[in-house]
Amino acid sequence: MTLQLKSVFKDLLWNYREILLSIGTKPVSIDRQIRFLDDFFIAEEVKDIVFDKELITKWYKFKPEQGELSKFIRISFSRRFLNYVRSLGYDVEIPRKPRNISSNQQCYIYNSEEILKYFKNIDSYYSIKDPMVALYLPVIFRILYSCGTRIGEVLSIKVKDVDLETGIILLKETKNEKYRQIVVSDELKRLLRQYADKCLYLKKQNDYFFSHIDRRRVSEQSIYRYHRKALSDANINYMGGGLGPRLHDWRHTFCVNSLFNFEKRGCDLNNVLPILMQYVGHSRVLSTERYLKLVAEHFDDVINKTNDTTLYILGDDYD
């Protein structure tokens, strides 16, 4: 995937990237963080090489759906980059060192009643300023729930990436920088076609599939706001402190339900894990194996039908 930078900081970001590559850092380890910074500078309409206290406050709140580990990595990377910028003579503030990662972050698994109430609210939302909201929200959230995707992957989908005949979607902007395909259900394919009939007639192949009426990409922050609103309206308690329910917990719910459904069909979960790993885009099977403990916590004794080697302690590696 080609890294494209457009902010006022783009030259400094490119130069910093080259320095890191020259000492052996792999692109996959840094390009995502560089893209976060570039997206932030664009979103805040930063016109000069500045990073003041006001921007620092907004930077901490950027990507509110991130878990503690992801936020820790993002803030830490920005500190190193801004120290580099300061070394060149620019007057920039440095974000404070992020706090140690809490071990309290947990995966929240939605139950069937919560799912019904949540989506009833999602399907009711609209915006007078942007009529597209009522059209894209039901589809975006159903992709998160029924495909286990990350929100950034969904919002990065282009018109050319969606095959409405086969129901196959190509994800390009993934966490591991590897393309992958997802196949949607017949019902979701029907919703995608309905959305396309109403919204895509003026779009070009390289436009974002989900966008505002002026073709701007839908932001993760706006989706997160609707997520929090749907939780509140459905009387689902938001516990905070890494306890959820976070937007990313739709991905966790998908993985747990998938493993449970495979088990109900009599499948050997040890054979299923590599398949699920590829589908959701985990870089290693360990990340997928850890969902087995969650399956066992939410459903009866599924874990007994797997090898003991798949038992791991919950941690921040749920990506």
Image: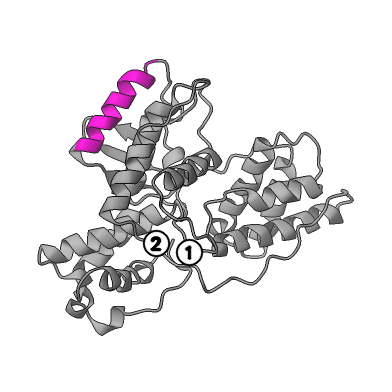
Numbered tag placed on residue 75 in the rendering = none
User: Looking at the picture, does residue 233 appear above or below residue 192?
Assistant: below
> Closest to the observer: 161 or 316?
316
Q: Answer whether residue 191 is magenta in the image.
A: yes
**Which residue corresponds to the image point at 34% horizontal and 66% vertical from the top-left?**
288
**Residue 269 image offset from top left, x and y in percent:** 20, 69
- Label 1 environment density (alpha carbons within 10 Å; few <14, some 14–19, many ≥20): some
**Which residue corresponds to the image point at 51% horizontal and 72% vertical from the top-left?**
104
Q: Is residue 143 visible?
A: no
* Residue placed under numbered mark 2 in the picture: 108
**Label 2 sits on what residue type?**
Tyr
Q: Which of disc 1 and disc 2 is earlier in sequence?
A: 2
Q: Answer whether residue 46 is magenta in the image.
A: no
Numbered tag placed on residue 243 in the rendering = 1
**Which residue corresponds to the image point at 46% horizontal and 55% vertical from the top-left?**
246
Q: What element carries label 1?
A: loop
Please state the extent of the stretch shown in magenta in the rendering. Answer: 187-201
**Residue 2 image offset from top left, x and y in percent:** 53, 43
10 sits to left or right of 188: right
Q: Is the magenta stretch mostly helix, strand or loop?
A: helix
262 sits to left or right of 239: left
Dividing the picture into quarters, in which one does residue 4 lie? top right
Query: What is the distance, in whole Å, between disc 2 and disc 1 at their CAs?
Result: 7 Å
